[in-house]
Structures are given as structure tokens and as C-alpha cells.
Image (tube, rainbow, N blue to C red):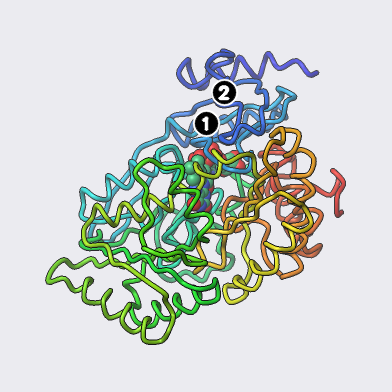
Amino acid sequence: MEDRTAFIDTAAALLGPRGFTRDADLMEPWLTDWRGRFTGAALALASPASTAEVAALVRLCGEHGVAIVPQGGNSGMCGGATPDDSGEAILLSLRRMNAIRSFDAAARQAVCEAGVILQTFHEAAETHGLRFPLTLGGKGSATIGGLISTNAGGTQVLRHGSMRAQVVGIEAVMADGSLFDSLTALKKDNRGFDLKQLLIGSEGTLGIVTAATLTLVPAIADRVVLWAGVRSLEAARALLLHCQAVAGDALEGFEVMAQTTLDDVVAHAPGARQPLAGKHAWHALIELVSDRAGADRLGALAEELLASAWEAGLVEDAVISSNEAQAEAFWLLRDEIAPAERAKGPAVQHDISVAVEQMPEFVEEAVPMLEAAWPGTEAVAFGHLGDGNVHFHVIAPPGVEARAWQEGDGKKISAQVYDLVTKWHGSISAEHGIGQLKRDELARLGDPVALGLMRAVKQALDPKGLLNPGKLVPLAREGANA
Ligand SMILES: Cc1cc2nc3c(=O)[nH]c(=O)nc-3n(C[C@H](O)[C@H](O)[C@H](O)COP(=O)(O)OP(=O)(O)OC[C@H]3O[C@@H](n4cnc5c(N)ncnc54)[C@H](O)[C@@H]3O)c2cc1C
């Protein structure tokens, strides 16, 4: 192992005691990923306070050949922010860079540093009568830099798009320490490649995002949540198309779950109740919003929507939230799916997408096929039907030992799910990214041309391979799919 003393001394002097530590206790919480699947080791934890410090540190790492693992809130789902166990890489935390540099309410834009927590940004937008239209369960930890680097989605993608759609400018430190400064938001700019798009979703493998210019939309003044029982997932999709036609821009969210999933939630979550009197094969949660308050316009729209859906035979039963508490109670049923599933037993989770119009058919084929191939398992699909993206989980047979099942049958099941998704021309990662969790599956199933292009970009932008090595795409020299 190379002597790192010179690097450590220089980095410590550069960043000072608040910005650089090798204390095992201080590093420990950041060395295991949020799901507890990966644990690594680090040479040091670096927490620069400014873009200039990030740039100087990255240059220093380049000079000494030290690998860098960028980290925001460490809430990612694929182990992308966890170093390997060599202890040779530094963990570069962006959490101290948490300033909202500017807020232009008239232009509906803000410039945020990478370490700003999503929830903090939501609260800041609210004080200006605006909102940032991207939210997810990890909003209390996830940072702007991490959300950009994983191109995160959530429940509002249907109307507003994923993180990619919210980013209009980026500032990033590249692998050689140079600064890519593209924070100015230009509505029109045709000077060649849109380079910021390369950084979005690149999981820290091409550059360190230090700040971004983000778009905002008017705050919600009114919302109504509907709950509908339908006879099949195909009927849920027909209802979605109907909602889009009738409600237009007011349609903010459309989530689905099967009756069995709803039953699990009601059995698990304190205070949760079935929203409808009878049982239905599938359920849809539909959110309508307006940025203009008053005169129960949304209530009338919801009534019209349901009446016409009823007439067209699209719903078996439905209810409209009569107040905010009931709207929240409907969303609780959606948010409690993951905890209810965890209480039931170990599972393997897949965040997949296929073409929106094919999702019902895909689920109908995949669920019985997997349950037949793996007796005792239960396959469940829920989530963002409108984005062609469901969380496809397979719950273990009762009584198995969790870790052994996940490492054995669970891995084989996942490979089968990904094979099936690939056969349907879908994606093995709709929202959460690749990280180290799915890197080998991407190498196994990815289009060779696309993988070759990704490797070429990586080689061009990070020729020494120091930015988040071992994540996202394996380099050709590392083996698979060269
Ligand atoms: C309860 C819960 C619910 C979630 N729900 C959803 C959901 O509905 N939809 C969805 O899309 N995601 C969801 N997520 C995952 C979400 O994508 C991540 O939480 C978030 O995007 C990662 O942000 P982070 O700051 O924690 O990044 P980290 O976990 O720290 O890092 C994630 C990746 O980005 C890289 N990275 C981090 N910061 C930077 C930076 N500044 N520059 C370059 N690279 C960087 C890391 O190296 C790593 O590869 C959920 C997470 C949780 C915990």
C-alpha cells in the first residue's frame, strides 16, 4: 500500500479540522448504505465548505491517485455512496455545502448548493409562495446533489418529470479539478452538447455536483384526493387515461396497489382503514391539485371525473376526500406499503419500468410466473403506473432466514425479474440508479453499444478512474461486457 501521509497532511491542512477527519467514530455512520446492504472503509472523511475547497481537494486526489466517493445524505438505494472495503478512497461529503445561494421568486428559480436537504428546500420555497415539484420518502435526508446524481423521481413525475426536468443549470468540479460552471439558466442554448445532462444521473462517476439552478412552480392552493377500486390493472390504466383527458394539468399523481397489498397495510399501520366498503382487485390513488384556491373548483372537477368514469364502466367504487385529513389518510395507505411489507418478512425489491401502455400486461405475466417458479413467494407490484414504473417486490416464503434467502433464491429471483424486464425492452432501474447493487446486472443485460458509449464518456472525463470507482458502469478493463 502506497504511503498516504503526504496526501493526508495536505488534505487536512487544506480543509481544516471541520472539513477533514480520520476519526473512526465520526466516519462510521457514513460507511454503511441506507438499506444496510453495503459497508465499506475510507481513508478519510472530507467535508469541504466551498466549491473552491472541493476543486482543490479533487486536484490533490488526482496528484496522489486517491479515489473519491461523493456522498450527500447517504439515502440512496443502490450503495452508490458507499466506498469499497479497501480503505483507500476518501468519502467526499457535500453536506456542509448547504446554502441556498439565491432565490428568484419572479423567475421561479433558485440556486442551491449540493448539500441542501430536499425538505429544507421545500420549506424555503413555501415561504415564497412556491414549491419544488419533486418529493420522495427520503426527503428529510436526500440532498440536491444526490437527487441530481441519481436523477431521482418520486410521486410527482407524472406531471412534473424527474429531477432531470427540474435542473436548469449545474456547477460541478470535474475529475481534473476544473470547474464546469453552467449555473445560468438559458431557455435557449444550442452551443452543442447539453453537458449538464451528462452529470445528471451519473452517480458521482463523472464529476462532483457542487450547486444547481432549479425550477419552481406555484404552491398548491387546493387539492383533492380520490380513491378508486377497479377490476384490473388494465382498468386502472384506462382510468388513468380518462383522468388525463378530463383533469388535464390538475392531475398531479396516480398510484396503484393491489387489494392484497392494501390488506397488508391496513393490518400493519395503526389507524389505517379500507377506504372503500368492498374488495377490488386493484386500487388507484388519484391526486388533483390547483394553484388557485376557491369555490370548490377541484371538488366539482373530481365529481365530474368520477361520474364520467362511472358511466364509462371504469371504476367499481370510488370516494373523494372530503377534507385534508382524509386526503392525508389516503396517502398514508400508499406511504405505509414499504413498512407493512418489511413487517411481513424479507423480500427482494426491483424498481423497474416498461413502456407505460405495456405495464398491465407485464405485471399480469410476471406475477404468476414468478410465484409459480418460486413456491411460497408473493409477488407484489405497486406505485407509479402513470410513469410505467412499478416497485416489483417478491416476498420470501414464510419462515426463511432473511440473509440466506436474499443471497440465495432472492438473487436468482432478481436475475429472473431483470431478464423478463429486458425481454420487454424495459429498464432494470427506473428511479434508484445502478450504484454497486446493479452494476453487474447492467453489464450483463445492457445494450453493448450503450455500455460502450458510457465507458467512452467515463474514460474521456475521468481517465484515471478516480471518481466513484466500481459504481454504475464497469470499465472495460475490469471485465464484463468489454
Ligand atoms: C425512504 C426513501 C424513499 C425513497 N423514495 C424514492 C422515490 O420514490 N423515488 C426515487 O427516485 N428515489 C427514492 N429514494 C432514493 C433517492 O433517490 C435518494 O434518497 C436520493 O436521490 C439520494 O440523495 P442523497 O443525497 O442521499 O445521495 P447519496 O445516497 O449520498 O448518493 C447517491 C449517489 O449520488 C452520488 N452523489 C451524491 N451527492 C453527489 C454530488 N454532490 N455530486 C456527485 N455525486 C453525488 C453518490 O456518490 C451516489 O452514487 C428514496 C430513499 C429513501 C430513503
Residue 96 visible? The answer is: yes
Question: Residue extending furthest left?
Answer: 295
Front-most of residues 122 and 297: 297
Q: Residue visible at 40% across and 55% down?
A: 134
User: How far across and down, in percent of the image, does residue 35 sit?
Assistant: 59, 36
Which residue is the extreme one toward the bottom? Answer: 312
| Secondary structure state at the residue bearing disc 2 | strand
Q: Quick one: 264 or 250, which is closer to the camera?
A: 264
Q: Tell me the residue that label 2 is attached to.
A: 45
Q: Amino acid at mark 2?
A: Leu
Q: Are marks 2 and 1 in contact (CB under 8 Å)?
A: yes
**Quarter-wise, where is residue 410 in the image?**
top right
Which is nearer the eye, 242 or 41?
242
Residue 222 x %, y %: 22, 63
Instruction: Tell whether 400 sits left or right of 184.
Output: right
Q: Amino acid at mark 1?
A: Ser
Drawn side of residue 272 relative to residue 408, left or right: left
Residue, far front: 278
Quarter assignment of residue 12: top right
Q: Could you tell me which secondary element the residue under label 1 belongs to?
A: strand
Quarter of the image that includes the N terminus: top right
Q: Is mark 1 within 8 Å of ligand 1?
A: no
Residue 196 on image: x %, y %: 53, 57
Q: How many marks?
A: 2
Tell me which residue sits at (63%, 27%) in the image: 90
* Quarter of the C terminus within the rendering: bottom right
Residue 170 image point, x, y percent? 47, 52
Question: Which labelled disc corresponds to residue 93?
Answer: 1
Question: What distance separates the C-alpha of mark 2 from that of mark 1?
Answer: 7 Å
Tell me which numbered mark, 2 or 1, is placed earlier along the sequence: 2
Ligand 1 contact, mark 2 (Cβ < 8 Å): no
